[in-house]
Every structure is written in structure tokens, then in C-alpha cells.
Image (spheres, rainbow, N blue to C red):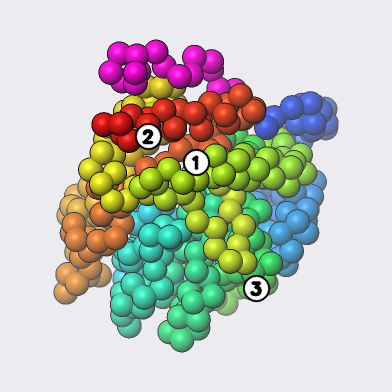
Amino acid sequence: MLALLGGEPAITFKFNPYVTIGNEEELACLRVLRSGSLSAFYGSDCKEFYGGREVLALESEWADYFQVEHAISVNSNTSGLICALGAIGLEPGDEVIVSPWTMCASATSILVWNALPVFADIEPETFNLDPISIENKITKKTKAIVVPDIFGHSANLLEIMAIAKKYNLFVIEDAAQAPGALYMGRAVGTVGDIGVYSLNYHKHIHSGEGGVCVTNHPDLAEKIRLIRNHAEAVVSERKLKNITNMVGFNFRLTELQAAIAREQLRKLSRLLKKKQDEAQYLISGLNGLPGLRLPVIKKDCTHAFYLFPMILGGSYVKKREFLVKALRAEGLPFISEGYANIHLLEIFQRKIAYGSNGFPWNVYDIDHHIDYQRGTCPVAEDLHANSFFSMEHCLFDYDQRALDGIVSVFKKVWQYFDEG
Ligand SMILES: *Cc1c(COP(=O)(O)O)cnc(C)c1O
């Protein structure tokens, strides 16, 4: 009998937490502590404007690993997105197209420059931006597209880059969930003009907090470095002529975080391979359950499996709520129903970002053509409301017992449906 209906839960053991920090990070921290230099950044025009030993080493190792010209560390992916969007020269009132299926910072970082997020719909295979919907949302105010590679699978970058070229738009990849995933042989995050990775605690690899921007454009790289570190303070010494978006922040990573991140980067290939193997095992084990669409990995792509996304089909759609409850009750606490549609957050519904009078929309969107109402992203909204559910995949470190446990729980719950 199902645990949800009073039976014994199929799983009684606890899943092991996903821990990536070990001896190597401990030694790296000691090295930095003993050096006495916990951050070597200066906010003025000198060599240390670019940070200390560990920060510079991390950046050069990151650029090597991801095969990209420039890597610029920041203190979060959110900060990285803010730097990237400032670097491309956004004007207040410009429009930036973004996905409703991402973490909210992909959209709110646009608001930081008083530009306006416009949400395009997603496609149900990988849950990434749908190129057709992107093209439909382009206006003469559109300046860029923020493209998440959501759950660890790249967006349709070939088509998105072609659209960007046609309309002269910048592409910023939010690769927070896809470090090390590949798209046509290239690292996800390095295909767009700028890519941003996260080193937040919840991601594949982390330094507590942190992030890295990557780009092959030297000008964009330098602007990102300026915005990271009090740009306004160095503008005159450097005799910079173009001071567009040179309001700087303090988005600097400490030496301790950088030293940890260097060790984490060394582990990325191994950690990623384990997550991919675990996902493949689950895909084989769950294959053939009726009404269950397992994660799709498109040709020429690899999946980083930050999340294990699934869709229900046929008569199973109506059973989602029961099914998710039943799976949880059997001992899988990391199953969730739907995925947030960020265009439906209050900030967009009420168009209140700065102050209480609707800025920046009340100033820059005077024709009120930007619509965040329910119905503007029908595919994303329908998946959330009806058929999508997922397993957190980077929360636990699965051993064989855990993997077999997950498969047997799904089979037990599905068997109940077959009989019912
Ligand atoms: C985690 C995440 C972020 C935010 O990263 P931080 O480093 O916590 O700022 C942004 N976008 C996506 C898609 C994420 O998953």
C-alpha cells in the first residue's frame, strides 16, 4: 500500500547530502589565511585593481577550463549578470528579452540598469527560451537576450545567436545551472557574448557565494572588471572617454573564496560526470513508465543535470498532485511540482521596482506595451500549472542504494495507478 494511504514508506534511509568541500579546500584556505591577504583588491587605478593572487589564478584557470579568452570573477552570479548587462551599454528604457523559467535574478538584473525585462515563452523539450517566441517579442527597443541554460541543458543557441545577429542584439547566457555542459562541442556559457556562472552553495561547485563572467570580447571583459570594482573612481585617472554605465559596485570575490573556487574547478569534471551517470541510471530505470516523459538530451548536447526535469502526459496529467505527494510520502522529499514563472511575481504584476510609483515602467514604458499578464507565456504557464515536475539533482550524493531506491519508489507509485 502507498505510504500516502497509510502503508509503509519504501525508503527509510536518509540520502547523503551533496558535499564538494574537502581536504583540498581546507589546505587552500590555510594557505590564504597564513598569507594574511584575504582580499587584495584596490578600488583605484593600480595593479591591484584586478585583485590578488588567488583571484587572478582562478580567472586564468577558469578561462583555460572553459576555453574562453576572459574570465572575470564576481561575488555572485547575480552580480555577474549586473556587470554583463551594464557592460553591453544598456540604456534606461531598453528592452531585454528573458525567460520566465529561471531564477529571478536573470530578470531583476535588467532592472538594475533601469531597462525593462520582456518575457518570451519556453519550449517544452528543454524548458529553455523558444527562438520563435523570442523573435515575436523583439521591438526597436530590444537590446539583448538573457538566455538561461536551465536545469543544465543549453538553450537552442544556434538559432538564438542567429536571431541576435539578425537584429543586432547581445546574448548573455545565464549558465548558473550548466557549468561544464556542452553545446556542439563548446562549453555552455561561452557561446553567447557573455556567460555567467554561479559559485553559490547550491550549485554543482561552489565557494559559498561567488560567480564568474566569461567572454571573448576584450572590451566587454574590461567593462565587467570596471563595474565589479567602483568604476567611477578610476574613470579620470584612466582618461576613459566612454563612461556609459560606469557606476561601479563592489562585486569582488575574496582571496579565500577564490582559493576554494580553484579547488572546486579542479573537481568539476569528476563531479559533473557523477551527476550525469546518476541521471543516466535513473533515466534507464524509469524508462517505460506510462505517461512519464524523462529528461531530453538533444543531439550535440550534454546535460549538467542541476535538476532532473520530467513531464506527465495523457491521463497522468490530472494525477500530478497526488503523484507528487505519493512519491514524497515514500521517502523522496526532493520532488517538486511545477516551476516558478517569474513574470507572475508581484514585482512584474504590479510593476513596482524602485519606489512605489512604478519606476522604471512609468517613465520608460509609457505606451504600456510590456505585458506581464497571465497568458503571455502560455507554454511555461501550462507546464507549471499542469504537467511539469522535477527532482532536485544537486542536493544529494546518490549511492547505489539511493538510485535503486528512487527507481523502486517510482515503480511502486506507478503500479498503484496501473491497478487503480
Ligand atoms: C542560482 C542561480 C542564479 C543566482 O546565482 P547566485 O550566485 O546565487 O547569485 C541565477 N540564475 C540561475 C539560473 C540560477 O540557477
Label 3 sits on a secondary structure element that is loop
Secondary element under disc 1, as helix, strand or loop, is: helix
Labelled pair 1, 2 in contact (Cβ < 8 Å) = no
- Nearer to the camera, 50 or 408: 408
- Identify the residue at image location x=75%, y=56%: 65
Give the labeled residue for mark 3.
217
Q: Residue at x 76, y 35 (%)?
A: 37
Residue appearing at x 61%, y 30% in the figure: 398
**Residue 195 position by quadrant:** bottom right
Given this view, does label 1 or label 3 mark the residue nearer the observer? 1
Tag 3 or tag 1, which sits nearer the N-term? 3
| Magenta residue check for 236 | no
How crowded pointer 2 is (Cα within 10 Å; few <14, some 14-19, many 20+) is rated as many
Say which quarter of the image contains residue 282.
Answer: top right
Question: Which quadrant of the figure contains the N terminus?
Answer: top left
Which residue matches tag 2? 414
Q: Which mark is residue 189?
A: none
Q: Residue 286 bears which disc, if any? A: 1
- Amino acid at the residue labelled 2: Trp
Residue 3, horizontal then vertical, whole percent: 35, 18
When the figure is inspected, residue 102 is found, relative to residue 182, above or below; the finding is above
Q: Are marks 1 and 3 in contact (CB under 8 Å)?
A: no
Q: Position of residue 328 (x, y in %)?
A: 38, 26
Q: Which amino acid type corresponds to the residue marked 1 in the rendered image?
A: Leu
**Magenta part of the chain:** 1-18
